[in-house]
Image (tube, grey):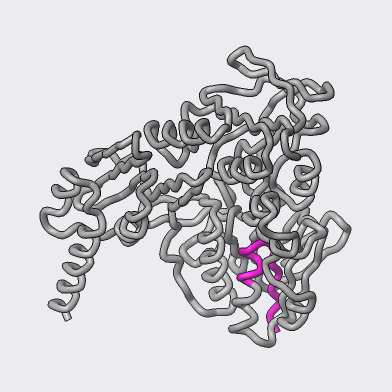
């Protein structure tokens, strides 16, 4: 009987455990989470703050006996301290040690703390755990003055939850635009304009220089302004939880480095989710992509390999679709373009619509869109599928980028025809 030990009780850990159980009915499975909560989804926390779900609504699986029925042991409130790959054991901060035959590292990520004086003051919170959410709900009452640091992908989701609570919200972003790692200047600027029109004050190209521990908090900005706040939310990015792997012999770069089977350099040790650095076939390099669809697929592939069913990860999906106060935006693949590539942009600011396409040879390699929801499926299909555009369709798109769906259908039909001819 094989012992499977899974570090991390988020979506990757739970999906991996259930996949193992499906294919290995007799194996032993243990999930270890570092929080006292039942396994839950961080992506549900904004909906909790909006009041759309209760705490149980954040749980990944419902029913007190779900894991017992699956014969999956869940250990809560224990954080991995070290991994001994020679003896195949993991030591935890509660003094316990667990042995394994197969190990999955699905420890996720942790919010980054910017080096700002006062960042640890009372009233400065992350929005990452259920404990954080409870503290935010107490302070972010209607009319409360809230400052949020960071307007990235996660920051914009938190922003929406705070706005729904009726607070007086100010967002401060160091980059020259909102969502700078997902959107180009035009798209990011349009999202900022939209948020300001909805009553959110936004400062881009601005840093928080200090948070003074008064009551209320007093925040000093790099633009010279001082703001009084009842609550400060830090949403300035995350970093993979992999410090406990130091000296383990498991290779870590930006994340825990894996091969196409999600196995690390140590046989029998795998990684998945926000902490994993996996190969992306679109960009041709290894990347950490902290989005839930990637975590789910990586967990499935890792679990199948852990039970001896050789499976290859097709790639890392570089996709972000964001709803910011009702404005839908999307980013796929190499949205900044590739060397020697061509691009086209179409912008109608009055209508709140923007489309940017990036080409590499005869393929669409990346794109940005704002307010153009009808093209999201075609954009994803072309970029993620690495579809070679049918003859003349690249030129047509350079002339009229709104013809994405027609280009996708024509190119898919052309590929299908070639496959039939070869057969």
Q: Which residues are magenta?
A: 1-16
- Answer whether residue 84 is visible to the viewer in this image: yes
Residue sitting nearer the eye, 414 or 372: 372
Q: Residue at x 49, y 34 (%)?
A: 178
x, y percentage for residue 277? 53, 53
Q: Residue at x 55, y 65 (%)?
A: 296
In this rendering, position of residue 366 left or right of residue 408? right
In this rendering, position of residue 230 left or right of residue 314? right
Q: Residue at x 64, y 44 (%)?
A: 164
Q: Which of the 4 image quarters holds residue 12?
A: bottom right
- Answer whether residue 283 is visible to the viewer in this image: no
x, y percentage for residue 245? 68, 52
User: In which quadrant will I find the N terminus?
Assistant: bottom right
Q: Which of the 4 image quarters holds residue 90?
A: bottom right
x, y percentage for residue 5? 71, 69
Residue sitting nearer the eye, 35 or 190: 190
Q: Which of the 4 image quarters holds residue 387?
A: bottom left
Residue 8 belongs to the span the image colors magenta = yes
């Amino acid at each position: 009987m094989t012992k499977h030990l899974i570090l991390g009780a988020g979506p990757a850990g739970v999906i991996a455990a259930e996949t193992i159980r499906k294919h290995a009915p007799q194996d032993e499975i243990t999930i270890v989470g570092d929080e006292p909560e039942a396994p839950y989804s961080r992506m549900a926390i904004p909906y909790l703050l909006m009041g759309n779900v209760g705490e149980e609504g954040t749980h990944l699986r419902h029913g007190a006996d779900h894991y017992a029925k699956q014969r999956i042991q869940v250990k809560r409130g224990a954080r991995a301290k070290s991994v001994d790959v020679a003896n195949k054991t993991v030591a935890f901060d509660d003094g316990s040690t667990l042995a394994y035959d197969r190990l999955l590292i699905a420890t996720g990520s942790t919010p980054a703390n910017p080096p700002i004086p006062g960042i640890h003051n009372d009233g400065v919170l992350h929005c990452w755990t259920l404990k954080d959410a409870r503290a935010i709900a107490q302070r972010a009452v209607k009319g409360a003055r809230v400052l949020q640091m960071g307007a990235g992908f996660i920051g914009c989701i938190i922003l929406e939850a705070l706005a729904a609570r009726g607070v007086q919200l100010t967002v401060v972003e160091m980059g020259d635009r909102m969502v700078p790692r997902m959107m180009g200047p035009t798209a990011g600027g349009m999202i900022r304009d939209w948020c300001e029109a909805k009553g959110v004050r936004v400062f881009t190209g601005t840093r928080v220089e200090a948070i003074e521990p008064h009551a209320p908090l007093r925040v000093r900005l790099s633009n010279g302004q001082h703001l009084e706040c009842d609550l400060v939310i830090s949403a300035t990015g995350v970093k993979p939880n992999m410090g406990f792997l130091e000296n383990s012999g498991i290779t870590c770069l930006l994340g825990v480095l894996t091969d196409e089977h999600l196995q690390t350099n140590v046989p029998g040790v795998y990684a998945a989710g926000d902490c994993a650095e996996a190969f992306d076939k679109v960009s041709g390099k290894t990347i950490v992509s902290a989005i839930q669809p990637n975590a789910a697929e990586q967990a499935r592939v890792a679990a199948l390999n852990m039970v001896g069913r050789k499976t290859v990860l097709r790639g890392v999906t570089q996709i972000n679709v964001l709803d910011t106060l009702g404005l839908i935006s999307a980013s796929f693949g190499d949205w900044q373009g590739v060397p020697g590539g061509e691009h086209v942009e179409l912008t109608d600011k009055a209508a709140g619509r923007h489309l940017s396409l990036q080409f590499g040879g005869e393929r669409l390699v990346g794109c940005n869109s704002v307010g153009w929801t009808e093209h999201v499926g075609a954009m994803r299909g072309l970029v993620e599928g690495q579809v070679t555009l049918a003859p003349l369709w690249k030129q047509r798109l350079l002339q009229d980028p709104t013809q994405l769906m027609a280009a996708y259908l024509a190119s898919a039909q052309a590929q299908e025809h070639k496959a039939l001819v070869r057969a």
